[in-house]
Amino acid sequence: MDRSSEDMTSKVCIVTGANSGIGKETARALAKMGAKVVMVVRNQQAGEEVRQEIIKETRNEAIELMIADLFSMDEVRRLASDFKKTHTRLDVLINNAGGIFPTREVTVDGFERTFALNHLAPFLLTHELLELLKASAPSRIINVSSAAHLRGKIDFENLQSEKRYGPMRPYGSAKLMIIMFTYSLARRLEGTGVTVNVLHPGVVRTHFGQNDASRSRRLMFRLLGPLFKSPEKGAETSVYLASSPEVEGISGKYFVNCRPRKSLKISYDEDLQERLWKHTESLLTKTEPSRKSTSSE
């Protein structure tokens, strides 16, 4: 599906995890449409190489780089603050960054890193930018989930995999959480002109998870890689939700291959959504600079 004919001139878009894979192709496609694209990456050098590549290919000079380690909630807040200091509008926020990890490790804030990167970071970044999105309406939020959410579980006694750890369960659970966040946020945004949708990009031929994967998983990637989607194809639904007039005003939906689909049944449980929302807010409150300085005194 070619979306390059859509005109995104004057639109300001943020794409997290934009230096490789689906994020890179999403940024490239939006740049081709004339959008001003802010690429959020962790590595300055790698990000700059991709930025220059996209500028050269698309002849769109309005491609910016912002550096942030999304494992850190302080970094997420700084990213949002820096963006608001230099930009007066935000038309599209694409929470694309994600990861799957073979062993359990915690971030600087003490969160299990799969949970932090795939759920807490997009939740916090969205909230930090929400007023700007409202002021820029009509605007769009796009969250990248995965069909792995079908293997996810919302267990408040083990949300951060303290009891046992296997890479797919926390990843699937975090992707289920971001779907539930999307549905809950859509209700809150009714009447604001801001829409929020979530998607599964398909099984994509990228380096995602391979550096951190077990030997058997790396072998699986090599053997089955030719059957997977290309990163360009994997980015199509993100680009569609960011740019297509067909989804103007549509909110609170889960998309696969540019079409709305049903997510896991439990993801529609509004009571569970609200409990997860409040729990997430509680965890993030503890990472606020004032709270951390008070607790360390």
Image (cartoon, rainbow, N blue to C red):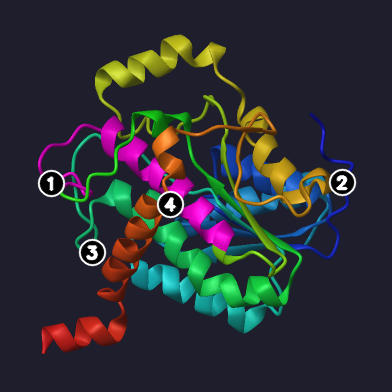
Q: Is residue 247 left or right of residue 127?
A: right
Q: Nearer the viewer, mark 4 or mark 2?
A: 4
For label 4, the residue is: 270
In whole angstroms, how far apart are the C-alphas of marks 3 and 4?
Answer: 31 Å
Q: Tell whether position 261 is magenta.
A: no
Q: Which mark is residue 179?
A: none
Q: Is residue 132 left or right of residue 33?
A: left
Q: Nearer the viewer, mark 3 or mark 2?
A: 2
For label 1, the residue is: 162
Lower sequence index among marks 3 and 1: 3
Compared to 156, does 222 lie above or below? above
**Residue 231 pos. (x, y %):** 61, 31
Is disc 1 in contact with disc 4, using a CB cutoff of under 8 Å?
Answer: no
In whole angstroms, how far apart are the C-alphas of marks 2 and 1?
Answer: 46 Å
Classify mark 1: residues with Cα within 10 Å, few (<14), some (14-19) or many (20+).
Answer: few
Q: Amino acid at mark 4?
A: Glu
**Residue 30 pos. (x, y %):** 75, 49
For label 2, the residue is: 6
Residue located 34% across and 20% down the image: 218
Q: Nearer the viewer, residue 118 or 195?
A: 195
